[in-house]
Image (tube, grey):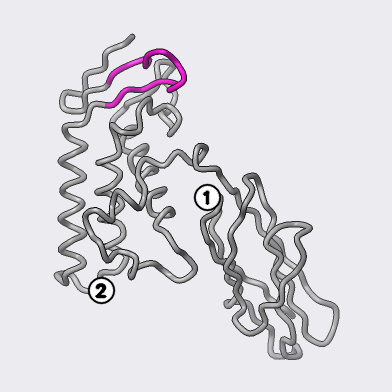
Amino acid sequence: MIFISAKLESIVQIDDMTRIDATSSFVSPNEAAITLVEIEPEAGSGFIDVTTDKYLDWVYDTAGDKVASVRITTDGAPVTKTYSLSVLSVADDRLFSNDSDIVSHENDLFRFLREGRVSFIDIHRVAQSLILDYLDQTNVTNIDGSRVEKDDIYEIKEVKEWSKFLTLSLMFESVANEVEDIFSVKARKYRNMAKEVSARASVKIGDSTNAKPDQNLDLRSARIVRR
């Protein structure tokens, strides 16, 4: 039997490189050897031979829901498995920070990029999720009681510093391999800076296309001012 196992990001930003990695795919002992590995990054785009490396680095130039396929051939009919991912525009991704924000603090950051990536956009997205989770856990909601999502943050600049330091801490945590190595020390430093920023943050919540926000949240006192 042919067992296809691919690793890929579920969310990708347009024009950002991502990797579709099928190196974990394998065949059972009674199956013939793999002769061909192909990846189609998007339905209808055509399969690309990746037999040598078994992965494909790709950049999507249009936004939308995509279906990537991995096809493996031995001595019989090929087996194909599909995977879904979403490609977002910069505006729809609405990340709270970007690489230019963090490079100003650590100018050699790009040497820590994981294989298959040319940016830390994926880490900025994790930081965004952590900030939104924090607001949820502290019972910060929209006026109708619903969870605050990225589009409900009225002005991104108010959470940019928070996101920037969280991203830096996450990045150094990912490369640290000892409790007190330089990377773990940096990770702890930036985590503390993120906490300090969040403790004194003032966040406006509401549709950014409106003339004014629905509410103004001062995290120092957890005081919400309704508009």
In this rendering, the answer to whether 84 lies above or below 89 is below
Instruction: Report the number of discs.
Output: 2
Tell me the CA gap for discs 2 and 1: 29 Å
| Label 2, residues with CA under 10 Å away: few <14, some 14-19, many ≥20 | few
Left or right of 48: which side holds 215? left
What residue appears at the point 45 percent right and 71 percent down from the top-left corner? 115
* Circles 2 and 1 in contact, beta carbons < 8 Å: no
Q: Main secondary structure of the magenta part?
A: loop
In this rendering, the answer to whether 107 lies above or below 35 is above
Q: Position of residue 161 (x, y in %)?
A: 25, 41
| Label 1, residues with CA under 10 Å away: few <14, some 14-19, many ≥20 | many
Is residue 159 or residue 22 the one in the foreground? 159
What residue appears at the point 67 percent right and 62 percent down from the top-left corner? 41
Q: Quadrant of the N terminus?
A: bottom right
* Residue picked out by circle 2: 177
Q: Position of residue 203 (x, y in %)?
A: 28, 26
Q: Among all residues in the image, which is located at the extreme right?
A: 77
Q: Is residue 207 magenta?
A: yes
Q: Position of residue 9 (x, y in %)?
A: 53, 58
State which region is magenta. 203-216
Circle nearer the viewer, 2 or 1? 1
Left or right of 69: which side holds 115? left
Q: Amino acid at mark 2?
A: Asn
